[in-house]
Image (tube, grey):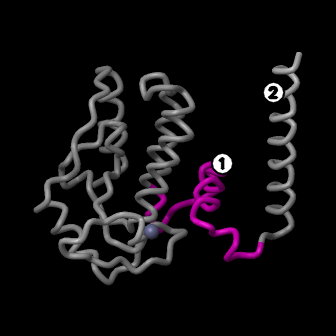
């Protein structure tokens, strides 16, 4: 499995204009991946979950540490049920990454076909690389911040001065955005 293959498939899928989404991975394929992950650390760099295989359990948000089968190229971006595309990640990371794709891209633009390709490619790269030991967070500052926020990472670690002033300036820009919008509505 490689990032090149993921990028190539994304590009093919995108160029074809095929917005169909494949189903979940077949049970036998998925079980094999999840069983092999049992007792191992979730590969996502900001996550300390030890993955657990729950035989026959319905995995919902009650089991954040459950081993799940992640499509390394998300299903909504042309991911397929083939071995090269599947890897174990904990339930929490799998869910949160899917939420970010949905909220920040698909919902924001209304439909996957309207998301600029460059933006989607950046997300797909981030989504793939976040479980690589060589992950370099400085290439994805916004996505990293979004993910850390969702995972509650900030509450576990002390912010340094730079991060503190960055988060304060982000907060004030959000506030001014909201008040600008409010003014537009009023006027
Ligand atoms: Zn995880």
- Ligand 1 is found in the corner quadrant, namely bottom left
Determine whether the beta carbon of the residue marked 1 sits less than 8 angstroms from the nearest atom of ligand 1: no
Residue at left offset 30%, top offset 29%: 13
Q: In screen coordinates, is 120 left or right of 32?
A: right
Q: Around disc 2, counting alpha carbons within 10 Å, would you say few (fewer than 14), some (14 to 19), or many (20 or more)?
A: few
Quadrant containing the C terminus is top right
Q: Residue furthest top?
A: 187
Percent position of residue 122, x then y? 52, 41
SS label for mark 2? helix
The quadrant holding residue 168 is bottom right
Q: Return the mark for residue 184.
A: none
Q: Specify the label residue 181 is tagged with.
A: 2
SS at mark 1?
A: helix
Q: Given this view, does label 2 or label 1 mark the residue nearer the observer?
A: 2
Q: Position of residue 94 (x, y in %)?
A: 41, 58
How busy is the neighbourhood of tag 1: few (under 14 within 10 Å), some, or many (20 plus)? few
- Farthest residue to the front: give it: 186
Magenta-tinted stretch: 129-158
Residue at left offset 50%, top offset 50%: 126
Instruction: Residue 43 in the image: state x and y as whole percent.
Output: 41, 70
Q: Determine which quarter of the picture holds residue 50.
A: bottom left
Q: Is residue 15 above or below residue 143?
A: above
- State yes or no: Cβ of the residue under disc 2 lies below 8 Å from any atom of ligand 1: no
**Magenta span includes 114:** no
Residue that label 1 marks: 142
Number of numbered markers:
2
Q: Is residue 154 magenta?
A: yes
- Residue drawn at (31%, 52%) of the image: 71
What whole-number distance in Å separates the C-alpha atoms at marks 2 and 1? Answer: 22 Å
The answer to whether residue 148 is left or right of residue 123 is right
Q: Disc 2 or 1, which lies upstream in sequence?
A: 1
Which quadrant, please, contains the N terminus? bottom left
């Amino acid at each position: 499995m490689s990032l090149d293959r993921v990028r190539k498939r994304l590009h093919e899928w995108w160029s074809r204009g095929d917005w169909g989404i494949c189903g979940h991975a077949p049970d036998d394929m998925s079980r094999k991946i999840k069983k092999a992950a049992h007792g191992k650390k979730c590969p996502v760099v900001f996550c300390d979950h030890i993955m657990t295989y729950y035989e026959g359990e319905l995995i919902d948000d009650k089991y954040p540490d459950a081993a799940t089968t992640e499509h390394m190229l998300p299903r909504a971006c042309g991911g397929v049920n083939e071995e090269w595309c599947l890897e174990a990640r904990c339930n929490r990371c799998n869910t949160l990454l899917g939420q970010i794709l949905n909220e920040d891209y698909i919902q924001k633009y209304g439909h996957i076909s309207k998301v600029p390709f460059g933006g989607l490619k950046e997300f797909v790269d981030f989504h793939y690389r976040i479980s690589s030991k060589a992950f370099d967070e400085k290439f994805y500052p916004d996505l990293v911040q979004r993910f850390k926020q969702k995972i509650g990472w900030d509450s576990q670690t002390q912010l340094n001065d730079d991060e503190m002033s960055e988060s304060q300036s982000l907060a004030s820009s959000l506030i001014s955005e909201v008040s600008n919008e409010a003014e537009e509505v009023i006027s």
